[in-house]
Amino acid sequence: MRKLKNIMVTGGSGFVGTNFIRYIFDKTDFDGIIVNVDKLTYAGNPHNLIDIEKKFGTKRYFFKKVDICDYKNINKIFKQYNVDTIVHFAAESHVDRSIFGPRDFIETNIIGTFNLLELTREFWAGKEDVLFHHISTDEVYGSLGKNGYFSETTPYNPNSPYSASKASSDHLVRAYFQTYGIPVTLSNCSNNYGPYQFPEKLIPLMMLNMLEEKPLPVYGDGKNIRDWLFVDDHISAVWTILNKGKAGETYNIGGENEWENIKLVNVLCEKMALLTGKEKDYYKKLIEFVKDRPGHDRRYAINCDKIKNEIGWKQSVSFDEGLERTVQWYLINKLWAANIKNGSYRKWIDVNYNKRNISLQ
Ligand code: NAD
Ligand code: TYD
């Protein structure tokens, strides 16, 4: 078991990063510090961690509003907190946005990752008790036909600017292990769902549209397949890799839970109907087939035997339970979604973070 002390989490105010930080403080025996470095793009919401900041702030949790492309400031933070572990979530993460505007994806996902790697080269040369863990996606492998699964040895074949930028960052991370001997691990995960997911992704978008009785836009014929994993299971896999993963190795993480989009949307409609007291098919009338996404990958499916057999991880939340918990979370936290939809979360960030010049504290 690795001893983790001073963890720099990048992108900790986004969906998976938020769940990661909450999990570490709530569900593990980690007793070190976490520095969350996040630029607070549209997808970053530090309000997600306000209770953690209150409970652990000034001693064990620190937030820095900094862009990972800003080498000078991340260098300063790295030194200040004597970082021994980087868990790198920060990214532009939405495929549709990457189609309409790829530049930010290239900058954050490639140049940002390169900057973090350069830090490790500067501060970690010759050190063994350090680790750079890179969070990536199964989308780097491209698209599957009806059969087969992505494994760690599947050749990269990315199809969107998002997946191409993530693929590029994966290659850089591997290269720093091979060339400079920096201890790195990588994980490529399938589609996550759960609390705090920005309502541009399929599951939260559909749920919030149902609540507003707006159309549910299903791309193309709705038969594209994704392998869904509850976010806490992604986090527990990352935690297992941080503690037991072998330097230089990639681990695939998946739900072993494939769903055609249209079938998933139907199930989600039924769950929502059940939990809002409507009749079973109530929300299904909102489903609309719309123009397909360009370059839309047909099927993703992960073989995660390696992480299961070599370091002992497995999924613990069934799809039925995970969906129920997710729908319930969005129903209880209607204000969270409303603040995103009406933009007031940006005003809150401006008052509480931007004006306090958090990055220099
Ligand atoms: P997200 O879009 O919800 O959050 C991304 C976070 O990164 C935000 O807080 C944002 O402010 C921050 N960020 C963006 N650019 C930054 C920059 N230049 N400097 C500092 N911070 C910056 O994304 P997510 O869904 O939480 O995904 C997190 C990671 O997990 C990504 O690397 C993504 O590729 C990977 N991943 C996500 C999924 C999924 O289904 N969500 C699946 C597999 C892998
Ligand atoms: P998404 O949540 O954007 O994740 P990714 O593209 O990274 O897999 O989309 C999941 C699937 O749902 C994908 O096949 C595209 C489809 N989709 C829709 O059909 N309608 C939508 O409004 C969205 C956002 C996605």
Image (cartoon, rainbow, N blue to C red):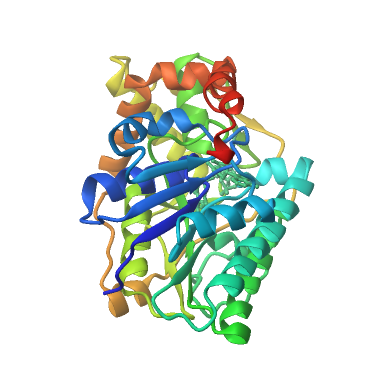
Decide if residue 320 is in sight here: yes
Expressed as whole percent of the image width and height from the top left, the position of residue 25 reads 27, 46
Decide if residue 141 is in sight here: no
Residue depicted at 45% across the width and 16% down the height: 211
**In the figure, 133 relative to 360: above or below?**
below
Expressed as whole percent of the image width and height from the top left, the position of residue 312 reads 25, 72
User: Number of numbered discs present?
Assistant: 0
Residue depicted at 55% across the width and 71% down the height: 123
Quadrant of the image occupied by residue 359? top right
Q: Is residue 329 left or right of residue 38?
A: left
Who is closer to the viewer here, 314 or 277?
314
Expressed as whole percent of the image width and height from the top left, the position of residue 52 reads 33, 36
**In the figure, 316 relative to 101: above or below?**
below
Who is closer to the viewer here, 47 or 65?
65
Q: Is residue 91 left or right of residue 18?
A: right
Expressed as whole percent of the image width and height from the top left, the position of residue 303 reads 42, 70
**In the figure, 116 relative to 278: above or below?**
below
| Quadrant location of the N terminus in the rendered image | bottom left
Quadrant of the image occupied by residue 109? bottom right
Residue depicted at 59% across the width and 85% down the height: 178
Residue depicted at 57% across the width and 36% down the height: 43
Q: Is residue 31 left or right of residue 144?
A: left
Q: Is residue 264 left or right of residue 289?
A: left
